Image (cartoon, helix red, strand yellow):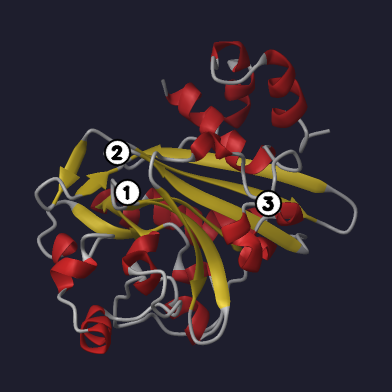
Amino acid sequence: MLELLLLQVLASCLWLGHSEVVNSFTNCSRFFYDGIPPTDVLNPNNPARICQFFRNLDHYATLYDRDRRIPVYSAYIYQPGPGNRSKLWYAEPQLINPTYSRDIDTETSISNRYKITPQQIGQSQAINQDYNQLHGLDRGHLSPSSHQSGNNSKWATFTLTNIVPQNSTLNKGQWNIYERRTMVQKTQGCVTTYVITGAVPGNTSISNNRVNVPSHIWSAACCLTNTTRRTWAVIAENNRNQIYDQVYIALGLLRDQPSVSPGRRRKELFSCLL
């Protein structure tokens, strides 16, 4: 089962160059390798594509699951640097109403500006109340603030459309080591590193079944050097403090992926390795 999930990790980074650019990601296509998002194999039934806009700039891109109220993935360019963590949490106004501001904002500010309640905001996305009584879970970033540079970019990651309920021990343990140490080591010599980090929906939820708790968290990266391109991916079960990076095991299981035709498997899954 774990190896099959690793196929999803590979798909996020390796299915590049063969899908159409999604119109709603046009303004933030620069966060994807070659400007092209993954194919729709990862799409939920009710998706929202978000260019995470904050203070006049897009900082990363998110595919959001409106029904489960968690992100499917967030895509960004790895650019760690100085800056402070945000003390505030934000929501996405345009998930409430497409005519609202595209700038992420606090629930209080949105409520005051548009004369709506937090409950009305929560009809379209997770809100602070959903995360107020967590037990053994943290607010886990898919695009982490530590991979951004400058206050605005770091603060932009503190929107709940970029957050999943993540196992506390994992978030503070092996996943934190991967984000803060392993990524530094793996990106040595990289001119640009494109990252997509995502969540596999699970069978449990928080906040009276409003917000899904993922079964797995994964991350895939494409590193471009001056002469080469390399990729890697990791996945973690969201109830254990352990990360798996046996990516190439998944390549041997292509025959077990019924949703992808054999020709398409060869063409797309291996395109970034050739």
The amino acid sitting under disc 3 is: Val
Looking at the rendered image, the quarter that the C terminus falls into is top right
Q: Position of residue 95 (x, y in %)?
A: 36, 65
Label drawn at residue 240: 2
Kind of residue indicated by mark 1:
Leu
Q: Is residue 176 above or below residue 253?
A: below
Decide which of 93, 159 is in the foreground and name it. Answer: 93
Q: Residue at x 31, y 36 (%)?
A: 215
Numbered disc 2: secondary structure: loop
Q: Which corner quadrant of the image does residue 32 belong to?
A: bottom right
Q: Is residue 146 above or below residue 255?
A: below
Q: CA distance from mark 3 to mark 1?
A: 34 Å
Q: Position of residue 4 (x, y in %)?
A: 49, 23
Residue 244, x across and y down, in percent: 47, 35
Q: Which residue is mark 1?
A: 170
Kindly identify which residue carries mark 3.
21
User: Which-is-in-front pick, marks 3 and 2?
Assistant: 3
Q: Extreme top residue here?
A: 255
Residue 158 at x, y percent in the picture: 37, 72
Q: Secondary structure at mark 3?
A: loop
The reply to whether callout 1 and callout 2 are in contact (CB within 8 Å) is yes
Q: Which residue is pictured at 54% across the width and 14% down the height?
A: 258
